Amino acid sequence: MEISVPAVAIAAVQPPIGGSSACAIPTATSCRLPPSLPGPGIATSVCAVLVKKIKISGTHTPASPRKKARKAARRKLLGVLPQMKRLAPIHNLYAVCLTLTYRDAVTHQAKDLSRFLQRLRLQVRRLHPGTPLPYLSSFDRAEHGSIVDGLLHYHLVLWLPRGFRLEHDRLERWWPHGSTWTERCKNLRDWVHYITKPTSAIFPKGSHLYGYGGLDQTGKYAIGRSGWPIWLKRLIPYGEHAKRATGGGWVHIETGLWLESPWQWTPHGITFKPGPGWWIGSPVFKR
């Protein structure tokens, strides 16, 4: 059914989720469209479609924050995994799966895992000087029972020097909060998917749901660069650095140049900003 423009209060409708605040929404009295859409009735139908899209976007049910956090943890740990695999043959390391379980929720403290890793790291350095301790970690709660009362536990992947073993008596001293379980890790991606499985469990306030460590400078740079937008990766050569600028955009460390995204959101899709800007005439972006 065609909707007449005067009958629709388009200006009162908020932009879709993720839209730019600078995106101009046509009003009921002035539905201005690009000259590439001529012809009678076009303005009315396009405005109606725009209102329909906005309505659908606004009524979409978002995922729960906990599930979003678990998805973010999975993406991050899977992105770190290749750097861990790169380090393993360099330092002659092998992967071990480890689970540290609390006997109850009352004994949990935020620094328990860091204390355990520090004790393990000291032992590794004593027996294998100069060897790093790469690791991935994920915080979880047992699914059986209540989402509040299930046993808390940490899942880890540890890369240990060959010849180093996680002995049971040492694990009991290093983790006095409950029980431990360990096994040789045969399929790293499957284990990462398992330890970051979706959950509706409730965790103590201030808990770190995932983490990683033990990377060298090459690995840290690769992980940091993986978080850059695609246009920035295309613009800055590998090996150079950038950081987020206060107020938006990025700063190229080596040159000091401030760079902003060349893209803008419009009701008709994502397009290049009209400029002026660094992308106008840039060989990196051919319009």
Image: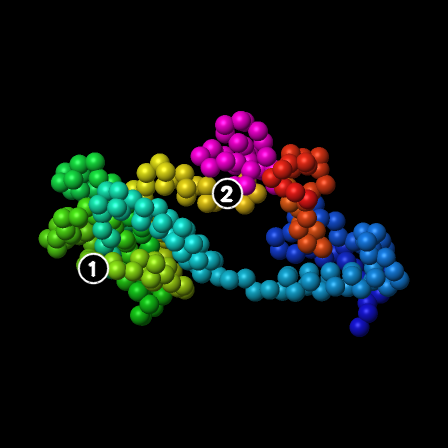
Q: Quadrant of the N terminus?
A: bottom right
Mark 2, residue position: 228
Q: Quadrant of residue 222?
A: top left
Residue at left 25%, top 58%?
Answer: 185
Residue 175 appears in view: yes
Q: Residue 183 has which mark?
A: 1
Q: Which amino acid does label 1 sit on?
A: Glu
Residue at left 29%, top 56%?
Answer: 155
Magenta stretch: helix, strand or loop mostly: loop
In this image, 80 relative to 274: left or right?
left
Nearest to the observer: residue 241 or residue 195: 241
Which region is colored magenta? 233-261
Q: How crowded is mark 2: few (under 14 residues within 10 Å), some or many (20 or more)?
A: some
Q: Which amino acid does label 2 sit on?
A: Trp
In this image, 106 relative to 40: left or right?
left
Earlier along the polypeptide chain: callout 1 or callout 2?
1
In this image, 265 relative to 227: left or right?
right
Label 1 sits on a secondary structure element that is strand
In this image, 170 relative to 140: left or right?
left
Percent position of residue 164, x then y: 15, 48
Answer whether residue 241 is magenta in the image.
yes
Nearest to the observer: residue 248 or residue 225: 225
